[in-house]
Amino acid sequence: MNNWIQLNGIHSSLVLGSPDGGVPQILYWGARLATDTDLPGLAQLASKPGPSGFLDKIPPLSVLPELGRGFHGEAGLLGHSAGARWGGQLKCIQVERIDTQQIRFECCDQLAGLSVQFFISLDAGSDVIGLRANIVNQAGAPFNLDHLGLSIPLPAQADQLISFHGRWIQEFLTQRFSWPMHKVVRENHRGKTSHDSFPAFIAGQVGFNENQGDVWGLHLAYSGNHKLVAEKLLDGARHVQLGEWLYPGEMILSQGESYQTPQIYGTWSGQGLNGLSQNFHGFLRQNILALNVLEKPRPVHLNTWEAFYMDHQPEKLLQLVTAAAEVGVERFILDDGWFGKRDDDYAGLGDWFIDESKHPGGLGYLIDAVKAQGMEFGLWFEPEMVNPDSDLFRNHPDWILQIEGYEQQLGRHQYVLNLSNPDVFAYLFERLDWFLSHYDIAYIKWDMNRDLVQPGNKGIASVHQQTQAFYLLLAKLRKAHPQVEIETCSSGGGRIDFEVLRHTQRIWVSDCIDARERQRIQYGYSLLLPPEIMGSHISDNPSHTTGRSHQLGYRLITAMFGHMGLEMNVSKFNEAEKQEVASAVALYKKYRQLLHSGNGYRLDSDDKALQGYGVVSVDKGEALFSATTLSLPEQMLLPPLRLAGLNPDQNYRLTFWIPKGALGPHGSQSNLVVNNGGIFSGELLQRAGIQLPVMNPDSAILLMLQGL
Ligand code: GLA
């Protein structure tokens, strides 16, 4: 079966096949090749010698590298049946072209009694590849599947890696390093996507930056455990392997049973990280998110958490509703504290019944007030959790994930409910459905505030089942209430991935809304994920998670490059302060459609004190950029800000929006700033850049561009 197949996107090509009659191999993934490319020639160019000191023939680096073929690197398939059937020598028995962009390979290992189907695609519109597999145990004896990870080979020039790390209130941090010998492993056993290991790697040629260079990005779309490996093999070949991390005994397949891997997404761009991000954003917009941001602009939120925490008092809430409407809020969200006996985080989770001592007669009074002000109403839930101090736990202590007989650590004083128990699933669906049916609720903030430990279901590890049941619960709820938007939150950004986005429409990226920290978090976030689903709220002063204070202008500019909201008690503000917040909200509203439908550009900066980011409309006729100072520059002036994404041949009117407190206190301003910009060509704005004024550290200004 030496027939190579070429899939083409707009800018990229993927060439794959089964040259040795085994598991499919990716021969090429990169810049688009001519449609009549000599594929056998390409294969010939890649044919490997057999160096001495090695096996006679170098084992294939297929999408599922097999121990049974002598692969000595990170094997894709690990498993056995009572100690036997562990090697794997799959033969390709069928190749089906599902359509022009998708191929299905069917492989079978008769000795091991296993069959595996591989689905590989390239989305023509976005240049995003997709890869997943499905394994079936065809033999009589159970097959113990320990691991199924899929490998994507990358070329030798991809010698630098970006990986993600982080923690609570510091999500999406990145580190960039030379691809080391051997391997880099990112494993996550937390039972959710995790704060500390967002499942993606980016590889690129040495020296790539935001706008230049070949880069490849790979993401595992999954909200459970994962294992990602970037490995350099002894022969110099390299691959990134992505898959679900399984507990011992978690996946035992009886005869006829199957396991499906999470979906892997990847993209190549020859235009640096911005090209890569635009591909991923475009793919999500077209294929996963179904948001019509032009028809229904993303509404401005006000969330009550940092305003009141769990101290819900109707009178104060109603005052906040009025004040929120006055400053232009469009969706009012009641956060934690409205149900059970929830006065602190030691009790109440699981009891999804309104606490009438706080909300006499239910939530009707509040929702009516919110609606009367022309706003939508949203409500916080944390469905998967239960506090030991709750009626639910007292009545059903066996409803949690656990290993019976073992003591289990609590996390935020709570246990995790076992969603694959049908009674638990039915209870949660009934409760959520009740609220969505009884009240006019437009949005749910769906939280999940602890890691899974001892995730046993009748003694068997059950993170896989739990994750599938979580998706099912979301899907069932959305089917019953398709108009309700759901936000994925897990102590901030602990559950963010492309799969959860099939069911959710907003992301709470971080509990940290300190503008300075958010700049860093949002940088990492933007690499794969688009702004219109990124919950970003203007924080109160000082910020509740860091104690830092910032000028409103800086907080606004930081928050407005996402789906903006307020996280503050505006009802205690005086008129002047309210006015200031109202004009911040109005400015966001003016630009949100551009911000949510255009192409994002992070700017290469010549000084680490400066961070620049912007959005350019698809027709390049309009753009909005921000220039942010992360610290004082080491030299007297900031370097010029070189814009990106504009039409070099077009003229633009540049104007500044310089909020209070952004400019340094001493010295004079340039003519450019005194004249509030001018008319310049896209070419000059990108090549020469804009000399920025003297700015205070922790401040930001906006640069507006209107094409002429
Ligand atoms: C988590 C969320 C917060 C807030 C609290 C409520 O920490 O990330 O935004 O909703 O729970 O308990």
Image: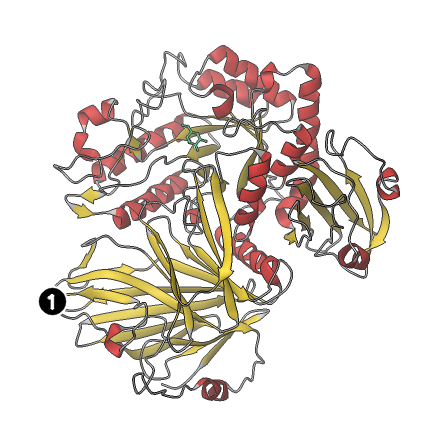
Mark 1, Cα crowd under 10 Å, few <14 / some 14-19 / many 20+, is: few
Residue 461 versus residue 30 in the image, above or below: above
Apparent side of residue 508 relative to residue 645 in the rendered image (left or right): left
Q: Position of residue 402 (x, y in %)?
A: 19, 39
User: Which residue appears at 14% of the width and 65% of the height?
Assistant: 81
User: Which residue appears at 45% of the width and 43% of the height?
Assistant: 504
Apparent side of residue 705 relative to residue 214 in the rendered image (left or right): right
User: Which residue appears at 32% of the width and 72% of the height?
Assistant: 65
Q: Quadrant of the N terminus?
A: bottom left
Name the amino acid, label 1. Answer: Gly
Residue placed under numbered mark 1 in the picture: 140
Q: Secondary structure at mark 1?
A: loop
Residue 260 versus residue 520 in the image, above or below: below
Q: Position of residue 93 (x, y in %)?
A: 29, 79
Apparent side of residue 275 relative to residue 380 in the rendered image (left or right): right
Q: Position of residue 215 (x, y in %)?
A: 55, 65
Residue 479 versus residue 355 in the image, above or below: below
Please name the colour scheme applied to the rendered image: secondary structure
Residue 422 visible within the image: yes
Q: Quadrant of ligand 1?
A: top left
Q: Position of residue 312 (x, y in %)?
A: 44, 16
Residue 178 versus residue 315 in the image, above or below: below
Depth check: give the residue in front, 609 or 566: 609
